[in-house]
Amino acid sequence: MAAADAATRSRIADPGLAPAGEQRIRWVARHSPVLNRLAQARLADGALRGKRVAVVVHLEAKTAYLATLLAEAGAEVVAAGSNPGTTQDAVAAALVHRGIEVHATHGASPDEFVGDLLAAADFEPEIVVDDGAELTGRIVDLRPELVPRLLGVTEETTTGVARLRALERAGRLTFPAIAANDAWSKHLYDNRYGTGQSTLAAILRLTNLAAAGKEFCILGYGWVGKGLARYAEGMGGRVTVIEVDPVPALEAHMDGHRVAGLDGLADADVVITATGGIEALDRDALARLKDGVILANAGHHDREIDVDALRPGEEVRPGITRHELDGGRRAYLLAEGRLVNIAGADGHPVEIMDLSFSVQALAAHLIAGGGLEPGVQRLPADLDREIARTKLETLGIELPEPSEAQRAFLERWTG
Amino acid sequence: MDGLSAQGERKIAWAASWMPVLNRVRDELREDGSVADRRIAVILPVEPKTAYLAAVLAEAGADVSVAFQGAMVHDDVAAGLAARGVAVFARRGSSHEEELGYFEDVLARRPEVVIDDRADVIRLAHTTHPEVLETLVGASEETTSGVVALRAMEADGTLKVPCVAANDARSKFLFDNRYGSGQSTVSAVMDSTNLLVAGKRLVVVGYGWVGKGIARRARGMNARVVVCEVDPFAALEAFHDGFEVLPIAEACAGADIVMTATGVRGAVPPEAIDRLPDGALLANCGGVDDEFDVAALRERALAVEEARPGVEEFRLSEDRSVFVIGGGVVVNLSAGEGHPVEIMDLTFAVQALSARHLLRHAHELEPRVHQFPAELDEQVARWKLDALGVRIDSLTEAQLAFLRGWEAFA
C-alpha cells in the first residue's frame, strides 16, 4: 500500500511524528539479528505474499519492525494497539509513513480503542498476530461472519493463550491458534528477562528511588514474577512472593524468597502484580498496605491492581499518582496501573523482542502455509529450536554436538 | 507560578518526601540558626535532589546561590528552585563561556561556604578570582575527583581555605558512590538504549566505589562483567568478587558495553577504542567528562548521527560503529535523573552538616583538606536507620571492656 493510501485509511495521532518513530524503528532493526536472518531465510519464500495480516500488539518500535518485515515478505498488514496506554504515536506515524495501515492513538478512549480493533477486524485479516487475544476475541464475538476467513491466529501472551483455551473449551475456536507465548524462545526469555529488566528499570526511572534495601512484594510467581524477583534482588531489593499455586510458591521458597500470604503486603515498599488475572490487589489487599507504598503492574491487565477501589489520585510526578488510603496512608500508583514497562517506559529490551517476534513471524508464516488443524497448539519444536540456534549464532556461540555414544546411551531403555 | 516552575516544584516536592534525614537536618538548622543570613553557594547538578538541598539551606535562612554546567541542568527544576527564593545561574545546554559566567555570578555574591562539585569553583576562586578568598570561609567537596584535586592543591601549598572532603564521609561514599552510581548508571544505560543487559559483556573500567557499584548492579541485571584496573588491590578485590579482570584493550575487544568510572581523563586509550566491536556502547560514569575522548571520536568518525535521544552513533569505518550515551558526560545525569533520592538523602545531609560545620569552625581549621567529623557522620547513618525503622544492637559494657583491654589473654 502506498503511504498516502495508508494515511487515508489510518487513525493515528499525528503523521508529523514519523521521523522520531522512524529513528526508533531503525534502532530496533539494528538490534534484531534473529528477525533479520529469518526474514531472509524463512519469510521470503512467498507464503505470506498477499496474505492479510493484522498485528495487534503494543504499538511501539519493536512491534512496528515485525509489521514491517511481514509487509516486506508480501503480506497486506494492518496494525492496531493492544492497549491504548502503550501505543507510541511517533511509531504509529512512522508505520503509516512506511505504507502500513494503523488504527491506534496513545490514550485512546475505550470506545476509540474498540473502534480501532474493529477497524482491524474489518480489514478482514486471514492471520492475526494478537496480544491478550484482544482482536481474536472480538472477531469471534462481534464479527462472527469474518471467522471463516481466518487461516489462524498467533498469540503473544500467557493471558491471551488462557483466553484462547477458554474459547476452545466453549467450542468456538474453529481455526488454528498458535500459542506463541508457549514457545521456549518466547516465554523463557521475554516473560522472565524481558519483563524483569524492563519493569525494574521503569519503576526506577519513574520514581528515581533506590531499589537497594527496599522490600519488594511480588504477586504471582510465573515466568514474569520469577524475572521480577530476580531483577529486584539484582538491584539490591529484598523479595517477598505471594502465590496462590503451591508449586510456584515452593519454587519461590527454594529460590530463596520469602513466601507469604496477603499479610506479606504489610511491610512492602514496592508491590508489583504479575498474576495475569484481575484484582490481585483488591480492596482487601489495599487495606493492608503501609504508608508510602509504590504500586506497579507488570501483568497483562490494567485490572490486576483494582484501581477503582482507590480514591482518585493526584499526579505527583509524570506517571505517578498519589492516592489516599484509609487511616491517612498514601499509595503511589505507577502508570495508572497499566503495564508499567510499556506505559511508563519503552517496553521490553529490543533483543528480547527479537526472539519473541521471531516466534510470531514464524508462526504467521506457518499459518500462511496452511494445513494446520484447528485448536490451540504450540509452535513446532524444530522452529522453536531454530530461533534459539539462530540467536546463538548471532552471538557467535557454538554448541558441541553430542557424540554417537552419548546419543546411543540416551536412546537405550536398559541400563 | 508558571508551568515550568510548577513542574519543577512538583519534582522537588517528590524528592523532599523521600529525604527524611535531610528533613531532620533542616529542622535542626532552622532551630539553631547556624546558617541564617550566611551566604552559601551550591555547585551541583540542578536536579530535584540538589534543588532540595539548596531549598533546605534557604529555608533555614541562608542566602543560597546555585550554578552548574548545562548538560546536567533541568530547566523546570531550576525554575522551581528560583521560585523558592534561591538565586539560580544555570540553563540546560549552556555554552562553556556561559557556564564560566554563571560561576563568576556565584562568586560575585561572595559566598562564605561553597558546596562544590569536582572542585570547579574552588579552583576558579584560587586562580582567576583570588578576591573571593577574602570572604570565603571554607568549602565542602562532593566528589572523589574533586577531593583529589584539593589534595593536590594542598600538597603544593595553593589551598587557602579549609575544605571538608564530604565525599570521604562514610555516609556518603559507601552509599552514594556505590549504590547510587551503581543503580542509576546501569538504569540510564537501559533507559536510553532499550537494550537487554542479560548476557552482555559489560566492561567496568575502574573498580573504586563507583566501579564496584556498577559491577554489582550490572551483574544483578545478568550481565557478564569484566573489570579493568591499574591498582593491584582494587584488581584483586574485583577478582575475589568473582569478576573477570583484563587489560583494557583485551576487555574492549569483546565488549558490548563499556562503563568508565576512573576519575581519570583518557581512561580508555585509542588502542582500546580501536578494538571495540561494531555496536559497542560507551557510557562514562566517572567524575571527569573525558574518561574516553569523545572529541577525538567525533574527529575521526566518518559520520556522527543521533541513533536515539541521548545516544550518538560514531561510524568509525564502513562496518563498525560505536555508540556513546549521554555525550560522554556522567551518564546517570546526562541521560537520567541522577542518583536515587534516598541515597542523596544521606549525601546531602552530610553536605548540609558540613556547611554548618565550616560556618561554625572554619576559623579553627587549617587551610587543608579535612575529614567530615566522625560523630556527624555516624549521626547521619543513625538517623537514616531510624527513618527506615531499622534497629541495631550496641556493645554491652562487658564487650566494651574487652575491646578496651590490652592485657594478654589469661
Image (cartoon, coloured by chain):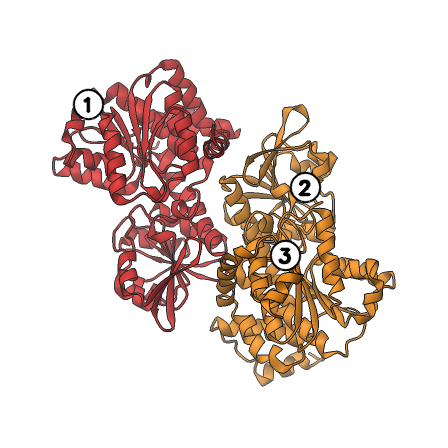
Chain colours: A orange, B red
Residue at (37%, 40%) from the top-left corner? B73
Tag nearer the camera, 2 or 3: 3
Q: Is residue B164 left or right of residue A278?
A: left
Q: Are marks 2 and 1 on the same chain?
A: no
Q: Earlier in the sequence, mark 2 or mark 3?
A: 3
Q: Position of residue A14 (x, y in %)?
A: 57, 53
Residue A260 badge: 2
What is the chain identity of the residue bearing mark 1? B
Q: Residue furthest left?
A: B157
Q: Which residue is mark 3?
A: A58
What is the chain identity of the residue bearing mark 2? A
Q: Position of residue B322 (x, y in %)?
A: 37, 63
Cα distance between the residues tagged 1 and 3: 60 Å
Q: Nearer the viewer, residue A365 or B122?
A: A365
Cα distance between the residues tagged 2 and 1: 60 Å
Neighbour tally class for label 2: few under 14, some 14-19, many 20 plus, Cα within 10 Å: some
Q: Nearer the viewer, residue A91 or A251?
A: A91
**Amino acid on which the number 1 mark rests in the picture:** Thr
Q: Position of residue B90 (x, y in %)?
A: 33, 36
Residue at (52%, 76%) from the top-left corner? A399
Q: Is residue A134 visible?
A: no
Residue B135 badge: 1
In this view, A17 is above or below A355: above
Residue at (42%, 63%) from the top-left corner? B256
Total number of numbered labels? 3
Tag 3, which secondary structure?
loop
Picture quadrant where residue A49 is located: bottom right
